[in-house]
Image: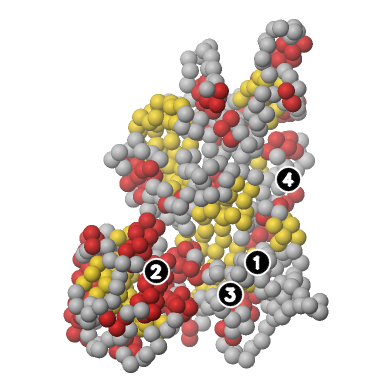
Amino acid sequence: FDFLFQYEYFNAVLINERDKDGNFLELGKEFILAPNDHFNNLPVNISLSDVQVPTNMYNKDPAIVNGVYWSESLNKVFVDNFDRDPSLIWQYFGSAKGFFRQYPGIKWEPDENGVIAFDCRNRKWYIQAATSPKDVVILVDVSGSMKGLRLTIAKQTVSSILDTLGDDDFFNIIAYNEELHYVEPCLNGTLVQADRTNKEHFREHLDKLFAKGIGMLDIALNEAFNILSDFNHTGQGSICSQAIMLITDGAVDTYDTIFAKYNWPDRKVRIFTYLIGREAAFADNLKWMACANKGFFTQISTLADVQENVMEYLHVLSRPKVIDQEHDVVWTEAYIDSTLADDQGLVLMTTVAMPVFSKQNETRSKGILLGVVGTDVPVKELLKTIPKYKLGIHGYAFAITNNGYILTHPELRPLYEEGKKRRKPNYSSVDLSEVEWEDRDDVLRNAMVNRKTGKFSMEVKKTVDKGKRVLVMTNDYYYTDIKGTPFSLGVALSRGHGKYFFRGNVTIEEGLHDLEHPDVSLADEWSYCNTDLHPEHRHLSQLEAIKLYLKGKEPLLQCDKELIQEVLFDAVVSAPIEAYWTSLALNKSENSDKGVEVAFLGTRTGLSRINLFVGAEQLTNQDFLKAGDKENIFNADHFPLWYRRAAEQIPGSFVYSIPFSTG
């Protein structure tokens, strides 16, 4: 690229910022922002993207400026994508150089220290897309020469490497001097999955390392190669890339005999060497080791250098993908995005991403990764594709990752309290066995992790009302893999459901007339009509959308014809109860029906009718049947609590529910 090239781009931190004279700052030109309800009313620019650069990087570095310039062409791609699919939210490109291009453009605010620590290359979606699953052995020199700051830098380097490992990776950490010291002594001679729990456990043990003695790198290398070979033969690891990370202040030999024994000529294990400290006396040996084994050498002199230097190994591991032009699409596990928090709280997301590389022959042969492109997908958008009315009262759909972690499940509770923003530490790695706990032999879990298609049945104890009540039933589980993703989908149906379906047949005129009644409402979290495809429909409730669709006033609305036909039937057959409730209210004497405040009805299609016998201000429970009362309304996960409990009883019987708070 051109080292002298200059280009004024929209810097996400500096846009619309002025100096004391009222002039726009450099890289801070005027950037029009307007609140957009599709993006939770955040001020965005849906015509342009802008660029975020980490605080620890120079925002006019030639590599960044050149990259920002050629990636400007993504603006048209982002806008066209959004025009074709208005349900899309954030689209972005994370560069291997460190800048992050985001659409729609939005202003980024630094923290109280004026820092934006976000580096796209540290995010799971970037790492997963850039590299393949890997088995890694980290060797840490703890000889006497590593005392003081060097050991501190070494520990931070190990911690940063752990940050780059994901659930598809396996690792172990070995400290060495005259002897080998497994950081976790209980796990010697093997590798463990790089999930959050294991990584945090190893970090705690890192603090116990201290420097003394002489560094015997040969015994450490022998051990590392043996572990990788043995673990690979078990078939339990990543069955893909393998690497040894060597963190030391020097090496007195090249150890070519060891590499000749274990790694040549195939060089299946890459060697990455990190020279700690400012001295370069032993740099040549470490460089040779890395280059002779398809790895990378870097020197880390200060704590500030750690993160940037650690990231280099990812781009080396991405080379095979680039050379083979493998545009593998990756999906992340569920995570919480606080920027799009809605009225119900924080939003669960998954990211779909893929690597980006140049098709020019001169760069292709070198395996140079340009970056990773991705977009976020709210999990609730996936749930909209599930026909809840077909699953029945106790039925539900769920999905898990290839590691058994839940992507979506009615029993996944990522927050400590409903409506609060305090996340549970391991909310993104909740295993299916933790919620479908009756499956003690993990039959269902193992089948889904292995991406099989089949059926499984078991008796379950279904908790309702936030664990206060239990329903005992037999569930039939149907499962299969979702093509093109690492996910498997499961559907749970209570025994007997789906054997018969009742189909009503009423005219549109009849149904519309009864839908117009003010006491009628529909489950707004169910997808009767797709109101996301066109901006003019996004403000519509599902009931409003159905009415417009049936009247033919919105030809662009896409609706579920079968579900709407059932809604019309339910509206017609339940309409007479309105007259009955009205007659009760008119004939109500002063003392009769004392205490009756509200009557309500629900149907299998999510239709509700509610009648108040007292003024709204006189209701004992002001929240009952309101949007915030998630347990007692139809939502994406389940039918109302009162509906589920009543459906389990003998026809003609009554269910009395006394709030636990009454004592």
Residue 122 position in % (x across, y down) = 48, 68
Say above or below: 415 vs 80. Answer: above
- Residue at 71% x, 13% y is 580
**Quadrant in which the N terminus is drawn:** bottom right
SS label for mark 3: loop
Amino acid, disc 1: Trp
* In this rendering, the label closer to the viewer, 4 or 1: 1
- The first of marks 2 and 4 along the sequence is 2
Which quarter of the figure has residue 641? Answer: top right
Say above or below: 464 vs 184. Answer: above
SS label for mark 1: loop
Residue 268 position in % (x across, y down) = 28, 75
Residue 26 position in % (x across, y down) = 71, 80
* In this rendering, the label closer to the viewer, 2 or 1: 2
Query: Crowding at label 4, few (<14), some or many (≥20) Cα neighbours within 10 Å?
Result: few
Reading the image, the residue beneath label 2 is: 159
Amino acid, disc 2: Ser
- The first of marks 4 and 1 along the sequence is 1
Which quarter of the figure has residue 444? Answer: top left
Reading the image, the residue beneath label 1 is: 108
Q: Are marks 2 and 1 in contact (CB under 8 Å)?
A: no
Q: CA distance from mark 4 to mark 1?
A: 27 Å
Q: CA distance from mark 4 to mark 3?
A: 38 Å
SS label for mark 4: loop
- The first of marks 4 and 3 along the sequence is 3
Say above or below: 409 vs 217. Answer: above
Query: Crowding at label 3, few (<14), some or many (≥20) Cα neighbours within 10 Å?
Result: some
Numbered tag placed on residue 539 in the rendering:
4
From where the camera sits, is residue 561 visible? no
- The first of marks 2 and 1 along the sequence is 1
Q: Is residue 500 left or right of residue 168?
A: right
